[in-house]
Image (spheres, helix red, strand yellow):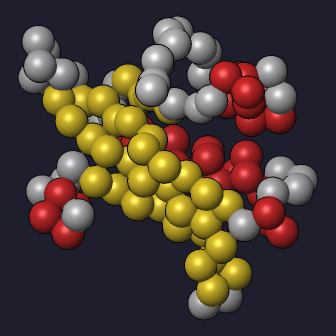
Amino acid sequence: MFVMEAQGQLKIVTARSGNVLVGYIFNFLGRHPHSQSSLYSSIDNMWLDPAYRGGLAVLRWLKLNDAMLDELGVKKRYIGIANDYMTGRVGNLFRRLGYKAVETTWSR
């Protein structure tokens, strides 16, 4: 993971309360195989302590993550969330940020 971060392929955004880690977002960055000029990101994992999920804190945190990706020149963003969350608060949160569901990922 340290190598990926050093090569600019991994950007981690954290949420802290004082010195205590209360959340993280793992953004993997890459170039599209057909268009090397197009930088994309994929959130592989994100977590926020349940005590900090209320109100607009998570929205502000994700907007900070998006701003960081904008600064890096990311053109396309992917976030995988389970179908169970698509109609609930998590789905509503990403729709509010301008994301839209574009495909289904199958897993076994």
In this rendering, is residue 70 above or below 88?
A: below
Drawn side of residue 37 relative to residue 66, left or right: left
Residue 47 location, x and y as percent?
61, 57
Residue 105 location, x and y as percent?
47, 18
Q: Nearer the viewer, residue 80 or 92?
A: 80
Residue that appears at 59% across and 79% down: 21
Residue that appears at 74% across and 30% down: 85
Which residue is at the far front? 108
Drawn side of residue 12 relative to residue 90, left or right: left
Badge count? 0
Which residue is at the far right? 55
Residue 100 location, x and y as percent?
61, 15
Residue 96 appears in the figure: no
The quarter of the picture where residue 36 lies is top left
The quarter of the picture where residue 3 lies is bottom left
Q: Quadrant of the C terminus?
A: top left
